[in-house]
Image (cartoon, coloured by chain):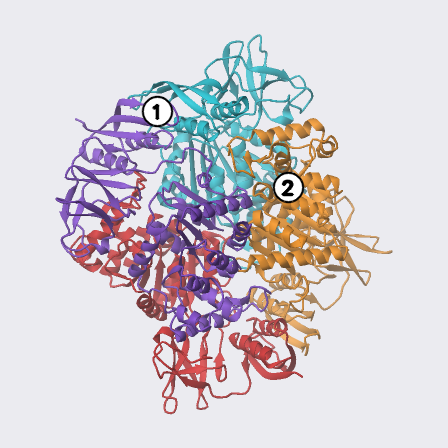
Chain colours: A purple, B red, C cyan, D orange
Amino acid sequence: MTVSRTVELEGHIIDSGTMQRCFEVIMDLGGDFDVEQFDVGRHKDEESYARLSVTAPDEGTLQSIVHELHQSGVNPIDPEDATLTPAPADRVVPQGFYSTTNHPTDVRVNGQWVEVEDIEMDCAIVVEDPDGDPTARTQVLNGIEAEDLVVTGEAGIRVRPPERPRDSSGPFGFMRGGVSAERPSASLIRKVADALREVKAAGGNVLVVAGPAVIHSGAGDALAELVREGYVDALSAGNGFATHDIERGLYGTSLGMNIETLEHPRKGHKHHIYTISEIVRAGGIENAVADGLVTEGVMYECVENDVDFVLAGSIRDDGPLPDTITDTVEAQNEIRRQAHDADMVVMLSTLLHSVAVGNCLPSTARVVCVDINPATVTQLLDRGSAQALGLVTDVGTFVPTLADELRE
Amino acid sequence: MTVSRTVELEGHIIDSGTMQRCFEVIMDLGGDFDVEQFDVGRHKDEESYARLSVTAPDEGTLQSIVHELHQSGVNPIDPEDATLTPAPADRVVPQGFYSTTNHPTDVRVNGQWVEVEDIEMDCAIVVEDPDGDPTARTQVLNGIEAEDLVVTGEAGIRVRPPERPRDSSGPFGFMRGGVSAERPSASLIRKVADALREVKAAGGNVLVVAGPAVIHSGAGDALAELVREGYVDALSAGNGFATHDIERGLYGTSLGMNIETLEHPRKGHKHHIYTISEIVRAGGIENAVADGLVTEGVMYECVENDVDFVLAGSIRDDGPLPDTITDTVEAQNEIRRQAHDADMVVMLSTLLHSVAVGNCLPSTARVVCVDINPATVTQLLDRGSAQALGLVTDVGTFVPTLADELRE
Amino acid sequence: MTVSRTVELEGHIIDSGTMQRCFEVIMDLGGDFDVEQFDVGRHKDEESYARLSVTAPDEGTLQSIVHELHQSGVNPIDPEDATLTPAPADRVVPQGFYSTTNHPTDVRVNGQWVEVEDIEMDCAIVVEDPDGDPTARTQVLNGIEAEDLVVTGEAGIRVRPPERPRDSSGPFGFMRGGVSAERPSASLIRKVADALREVKAAGGNVLVVAGPAVIHSGAGDALAELVREGYVDALSAGNGFATHDIERGLYGTSLGMNIETLEHPRKGHKHHIYTISEIVRAGGIENAVADGLVTEGVMYECVENDVDFVLAGSIRDDGPLPDTITDTVEAQNEIRRQAHDADMVVMLSTLLHSVAVGNCLPSTARVVCVDINPATVTQLLDRGSAQALGLVTDVGTFVPTLADELRE
Amino acid sequence: MTVSRTVELEGHIIDSGTMQRCFEVIMDLGGDFDVEQFDVGRHKDEESYARLSVTAPDEGTLQSIVHELHQSGVNPIDPEDATLTPAPADRVVPQGFYSTTNHPTDVRVNGQWVEVEDIEMDCAIVVEDPDGDPTARTQVLNGIEAEDLVVTGEAGIRVRPPERPRDSSGPFGFMRGGVSAERPSASLIRKVADALREVKAAGGNVLVVAGPAVIHSGAGDALAELVREGYVDALSAGNGFATHDIERGLYGTSLGMNIETLEHPRKGHKHHIYTISEIVRAGGIENAVADGLVTEGVMYECVENDVDFVLAGSIRDDGPLPDTITDTVEAQNEIRRQAHDADMVVMLSTLLHSVAVGNCLPSTARVVCVDINPATVTQLLDRGSAQALGLVTDVGTFVPTLADELRE
């Protein structure tokens, strides 16, 4: 005795891979299917439509299949309203709550589809005013409050994974090929420059996520220039990045090395610690800039150009600086705010901060990720973003070359 | 016109590399030297002694040289008392404060040498009761309180870097060769097992630092066994590790994959998020064990065997679990406590937590560091620890093979 | 004015990704399409069929599109005979010759489809006796002889990329997920053991490709055991592998280190060079075994168990051993012979030899690739093999664990 | 009952690490020592001298110790003549032959010290005309001819490891710090440019070792410029490098991708194979340049500027090109010739060719090694070269940035 459910797919379901994924999921999880209807888009601008009856040997298997299909944008045909269950206590979600993907998502409330605001993965959906003018928003687990109406189960939810661009032209057309181990670095950097220019020309918001390697690889001046020239709207970094950057201005060193002359490499970190204590004494980075203590560098340019910066704390921090947000939940909330505003994100040599930002991005965000370690780039791109580009290159030459391109 | 200072070295200064480092530092930083006395240890058990007059073209250069020499255990000959300066405010160190190394250190107070307690790198030294029965302790910058007597300058401070073991026998004798890319894995694992047994036989304390890869590489059962069998006294990990471990017990999956049958690999992280919400509902891991919700795994064994665990928060955490310490400064303090108690530290596949622990360890700690990425192992070992071993291997086979060895 | 061509696809064209690839290629290369017919397989065992008219702005673009489609198994509808052109001289192919893929391929000669023997990528196809009983074989460029009838152009050629297995059960069902960075090592090794047993039970041929790291990571005994127990039919390695293996038997060291006791690590390679000179003196490995000089190890077991071994030379070889084939073209031919016989290939920690073997394998071969460097594993798997598994793990624990599994 | 031997060291034995290494070797291998004399260099320009009596429990241990000390430049005090033994047959060395290090070496023949010509590691030493005007040369094992007088044992041999530069100034002063993972890329590239200019100004010979990644990372034009501008005297590469380079000129692609526009990425390698067949047809690269077929690129510039190039074959080659030396022993001899002429070697993204060149270099050679994989850089630098610099960076940005620097 088998059970079945009818699902449907529409859009560019062949070249987006949705149709393939659908067949794979059903077969991998032990189900079978009957294609009830298939209208293929005959031209490249025509969408396709498919309706399948999915069968499985038991209800558990069927549910697993439907769950997986759902995550890929294949939705049950029978539109029911989403189930709403009040949260039993602060920070406690009802059992069986719906855990979000990072794709644009709608929930059905009182027969109408409502788009979920600020979608990001691994969160709950909270619906407000379901009987009046319903809205739906993404809510992280620790932000749930008692009595919040949380979506449970998978009925009445529609996921819309982004489709790949229909051609490879345009500034973001090149952002499709994944990781670049064997691709020409200079040409790719030129494309990134074009994309940055385009986003800025359209009034878009650029978020740069930067690790300490940006500074000690010698790319600090070039990044400071990008900030000064208006290519950066927000900076997401950590205590180490800011300290290295300010140390360079105060002492001319990073990790104890003069990065111009390469002289006096030292094991000791005295300048690093001294930098922190000077900023503590000044009462923070803004004060240190105002006092004339800090007069150059990325943080200086952020202060001078009103670029929003978030320094998130980590357990490997020295100090930390007064500007560093030591509570990770609070820091995540600040990062979330930056991520939601960003039209384009450039991740420079930091796995920790890039993952934190990436966790808050919808799959529609444009992402450029630069790291010398291919495993880092692969991990960061592996989130179903439709417009993401990974460059396996040296941030110490990448940022200066990018700044050169933008100067022309 | 040149300036000069007399310094001295003693101990096994040749085979420990101190003498070589001393000559290098002086020449690299632009100084010169005159060896006034050199008594070489004639046999392998005899110590050596050297006294050098260091000259430099100016006082700044001389100070840089003396600073560097000092960090390597080469100390000025003229014993003065350390300079003590009261901290001007909470969290604010006096200017010119002495920033610690991770080597055993003494300060001279009222003519007597006092050992600095709980030494770790990049901290200040606070002296109490200087005129009575003086003590000295390491203090992180953010723990400084107004009026604390902080050591400033470099006078009256003596650093004693650990010497390498005099031969390669004994359980820790093998821990000298650095990173193991081309060394036989099985033989090294046998040596690690011997070292663990030896430390436990001597009543020592073993701290395991573990990343999530331990669980999803399938090594969870083996690590749980090590905890159960008493080889682990403390566990330092993060929210991700604990969640993956508990997810395995609750759902049989890690990152959505059944790690026994390898079936149903899924992109979605529903089980991961569900695990967190179940533990939140239970009120924490201990409650979840008490309630019979969590019945196996590493965290279960920690609770059942009273193994001290610290879960430090990070900005990439989902949830987090109620047990996760979200404030990074507070988490560092807990990690510091674990590190100071540890006689042997085993770092398993986590750069973030291993660096955090490593920051708090003295250079005398015994450290085994296991990671599949050679760059991670190199970075972790590069802290001047005298007894450290890096294994570039797969934690998914390392921990089970280690457990096998310990079972025999 | 546009030009067009009609192509067709059949088989499991949706879940194999062929349909998606077809749409992508046309759009990426600037063409358009009209789906003239699409019969979707309604159940999972039913094949699909599609016929498309492809249009492009000019003949050059159309040819690029048709060329790309062809490589993915999308073939022009109008069956013509393949064009055969005599080679102008030894080692010189006619211009416009057809360069092979590694997929099963047929050529049309006198109206009938002939399968190309021993298909491998980047070769020419030579047809014999076209007017009588035609045969077609793959021929490397340097093996072409004057007057060979070489296929030119792309007419009359049909490529059949392998389809993915229809479910994930069976010994090779697990070999689909690509690289394993985050998968449980022990479970995967168990699956590899099952696959090896299955292949041997079915009378299949197992080729092991091994690098020197197998020996100096301490896995030599375990690999020797696999040879002795009959799990290995052929060994493809280099001068370094064989020398390290024999050095272990003769001197108990590998790269100068005793891999049991870990004693006496030495920079010098005296034993390595001495080993080579002893084998030169004996006149080769077989003689050295016959003389009782070599009495253990992988090479010993190969000789004793009549396992075919090929030692291919490289420019980094010391010596080399008399058994090492120093001419790379001759060595490739020997490797080619091994590859064509293999039903399953296990690649252990060698990029050079694995690429050489991989170049000769059809896309239908089963491949397991083990390396500690994820970039190596990715590169080796990136060849369109339908049944390939990459494990990012330590060969020093992988081979012993595999031998353990097979012993049970 | 113990045995003993007296050894001596002289030179800058402290800061070169020789003294430390000497003590370590004796203790690690189970011996003891008595420092009979120690005259320390009192100033930085004064050399030191030490004479030690080494004791060991048995003759075997003593020999191991003396062997190890010898390799580090610590020589027995009693000067005997070297033992010369005729080779029994072609390619067969006498038993107990002396295996060379890569350090400058002398042998004592008839009471006089003779420098060994063209020293490289893991070879034999052949003495000619011992009773007349003796000379000594390095000989690879496969080049030994019957009756060659080969040095056996370790008596009468003196090794002189290079000392580190006495200060960090000068063009090569910066080449001491090993691998650069955390060092500023742009500043380091500037230093490499200075070193190149200096070597050329002094009439020195620069050997570039280049892998295919140079071309498909887009650095081909920049390297061609360096050749054209006279910065490169010799090129050591492989079949893949030359083919990719020529493919770019012929088709504008590398691995099928147009590296300017990034358009039309293709899996197929048709252009690659077509390039090879065109060069075969032309009869080689020089002919292809003369015929006007090849008109740009690195190989073109080599031909036009009479830069000596060696293309060494490997088992992963397609084709190969007629210029590729397929016999690895013959190729090694050509590489050896290039290596012996080189004053500075720049290794760009190729492990195989760099190891082959590195094997032939004396420890006095200046080496710059560039690779994006830190493990590759570490492996290449780990050969005791006194002036070697490793840069972990992207060759695709490194070469253009270097060319920029040299243009200024």
| Left or right relative to A53: residue A359 | right
Kindly identify which residue carries mark 1: A41
| Whether label 1 touches label 2, CB < 8 Å | no
Where's residue B252, x and y in %? 26, 45
| Left or right relative to B251: residue B214 | right
Q: Mark 1 falls on what kind of element?
A: loop
Which residue type carries mark 2? Leu
Q: Residues within 10 Å of mark 1 (few under 14, many from 20)?
A: some
Q: Mark 2 falls on what kind of element?
A: loop
Q: Is residue C319 above or below residue B76?
A: above
Q: Quadrant of the N terminus of chain D?
A: bottom right
| Left or right relative to B210: residue B98 | right
Instruction: Locate residue B322: give its quadrant.
Output: bottom left
Q: Nearer the viewer, residue B32 or B363?
A: B32
User: Does the rendering let one see residue A104?
Assistant: yes
Q: Quadrant of the C terminus of chain D?
A: bottom right
Kindly identify which residue carries mark 2: C321
